[in-house]
Image (cartoon, helix red, strand yellow):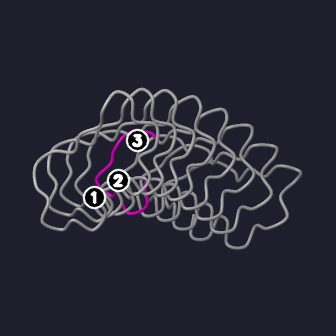
Amino acid sequence: TYTNCYNLTGSPVCGDNVVSMIFTYANCNKLTGSPVCGNSVTNMYLTYSGCSKLTGNPVCGPNVTTMTYTYQNCIGLTGSPVCGNNVTTMSGAYTNCYKLAGPPVCGSKVTDMTNTYYNCTNLTGQPACGSNVTNMANAYYNCQNLTGAPACGFNVTNMANAYYDCISLSYSPICGDNVTNMANAYYNC
């Protein structure tokens, strides 16, 4: 709807009956305030990608299933990441949101965590991985302040770079029986 509206200012809005927010505010880099998401929204694909001046906490409505690159490069967001109970894909959801703090989240229905917390250097606490996750490639890449044990569900097959540069993790690596790709999974831990 407002994709690439570089001069759009003010706060984003979302009506009560909106179901899809695909690309709604992508690259609206002058928007300020907090992101919004109505209770009916199911798809937040690239919704706020590139909205670098948004502040406050990220949001995820109760019916959202897709968070693919939702907040990619939203470098002004603070607070903790969110994930609704119905989310199935979080691929790239918080890529480069380096001001987010608090523990990462992963809903029980999530299957794809590719690049989910890539370069979220201020996240703290223990990594999360739901039992349905199959792809964790780059999931926590460069999350330097995560502590505790790395997480890996029994259904994960791809862990390439999953915990690359997670220098504060302190427990033994965990790997499920179904993993087929572990390239650099615990590099520099």
Kind of residue sitting beneath label 3: Pro
Tell me the CA gap for discs 2 and 1. 5 Å
Question: Relative to residue 101, is residue 173 depicted above or below?
Answer: below
Tell me the CA gap for discs 3 and 1. 24 Å
Kind of residue sitting beneath label 1: Tyr
Give the label on residue 24, or none: 2
Left or right, 46 with respect to 138, comes to left
The quadrant holding residue 4 is bottom left
The quadrant holding residue 120 is bottom left
The residue identified by callout 3 is 81
Mark 2 and mark 1 in contact? Answer it, CB < 8 Å: yes
Question: Relative to residue 141, is residue 154 depicted above or below?
Answer: above
Magenta highlight range: 94-103
* Residue 96 covered by magenta stretch: yes
Q: Nearer the viewer, residue 11 or 129?
A: 11
- Packing grade of label 3 (10 A; few <14, some 14-19, many >=20) is many
Kind of residue sitting beneath label 2: Thr
Give the position of the N terminus as an image quadrant.
bottom left
**Image coords of residue 61 (percent x, y):** 43, 31
What is the chief secondary structure element of the magenta stretch? Answer: loop
- Badge 2 marks a residue whose secondary structure is loop
**Image coords of residue 128 (percent x, y):** 59, 41
Q: Nearer the viewer, residue 146 or 128?
A: 128
Left or right, 151 with respect to 48, comes to right
Q: Mark 3 or mark 2, which is nearer the start of the sequence? A: 2
The residue identified by callout 1 is 2
